[in-house]
Image (cartoon, rainbow, N blue to C red):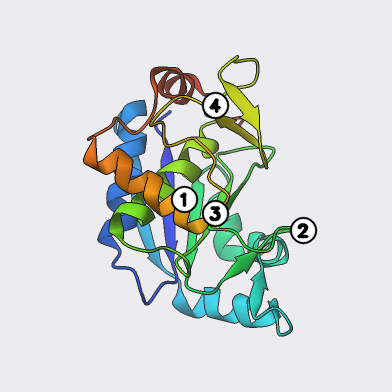
Amino acid sequence: MKDHLILFDGSRKMHASLPLTAMHEVTVLRGEPKIERVEAQALTDNFAAKYHNRQRNQVDGRAFLQALNETEVMQHYPDAGKIILLDSDLYVGRLNWCFGSMTSTLGGLGYIVLSTNRMKDTIHAKDIIRHELGHMFKAPSQGRRNTKESLGLHCTMSDCVMQQKLDVREAIRYAHQRSRKSSPIFCPDCEKDLRAYVAPR
């Protein structure tokens, strides 16, 4: 079965072509994907306001995603990978902030929530989207030697988009380094993981 990914676009800052291009770049490695865009500014605005933490001036990403998951529009696509894009700054759990977060589900490809708030430019933004999509397709996989645990499993291979960068400036620097070198999106091991993944149904 072909992958089905849906961009729930709640951003006013980012042109839709950027996330759609990044989605295609990643999922084409798995065959010809079905990719859709749904206008979602009203939906994301509503839930972002509801789960906005005034003291932090951020949205609680976990509560936001759990509530959004229960909506009829999300339940209508049980197997599709859902990428929710919004402009509000996010935090998840004990993290002070995050670019994005991937949440698995018992069936289907799960959810990615992405914030444009700390994305510097198109190069940086594309790599963040690619990174979270890599997690959606379980790259890197458990049991590999060239990985490390750092807020989830991440790759240690040079110039792989699945490396973890915990500092905004370092993440921007790394994205631009990869771009200057015209590096492949994934190292061979992460690409193999991504191609091999079969989502639960």
**Identity of the amino acid at label 3?**
Asp
| Disc 4 and disc 3 in contact, CB within 8 angstroms | no
Q: Nearer the viewer, residue 195 or 56?
A: 56
Residues marked 3 and 2 touching at CB (< 8 Å):
no
Read off the residue under disc 4.
Answer: 140
Q: Residues within 10 Å of mark 2 (few under 14, many from 20)?
A: few
Q: Residue at x 35, y 37 (%)?
A: 26
Sequence-wise, which precedes: disc 1 or disc 2? 2
Of labels 4 and 2, the one closer to you: 2
Q: Quarter of the image holding residue 18?
A: bottom left
* Dot 3 or dot 2, earlier in sequence: 2
Q: Residues within 10 Å of mark 4 (few under 14, many from 20)?
A: many
Say which of marks 3 and 2 sits in front: 3
Q: Position of residue 162 (x, y in %)?
A: 48, 35
Q: Which residue is mark 1?
A: 170
**Quarter containing the N terminus:** top left
- The nearer-to-camera label among 1 and 2 is 1
| 3D distance between C-alphas at marks 4 and 3 | 21 Å
Of marks 1 and 4, which one's residue comes earlier in the chain? Answer: 4
Give the residue at mark 3: 167
The location of residue 17, given as percent across then percent down, is 25, 59
Give the class, few, some or many, for how many residues have Cα within 10 Å of label 3's Cα (few <14, many ≥20).
few
* 82 vs 190: above or below: below
Determine which of the numbered discs, if any, sits on residue 94 in the image: 2
Disc 3 from disc 2: Cα separation: 16 Å
Q: Residue at x 51, y 23 (%)?
A: 197
At label 4, the amino acid type is: Pro
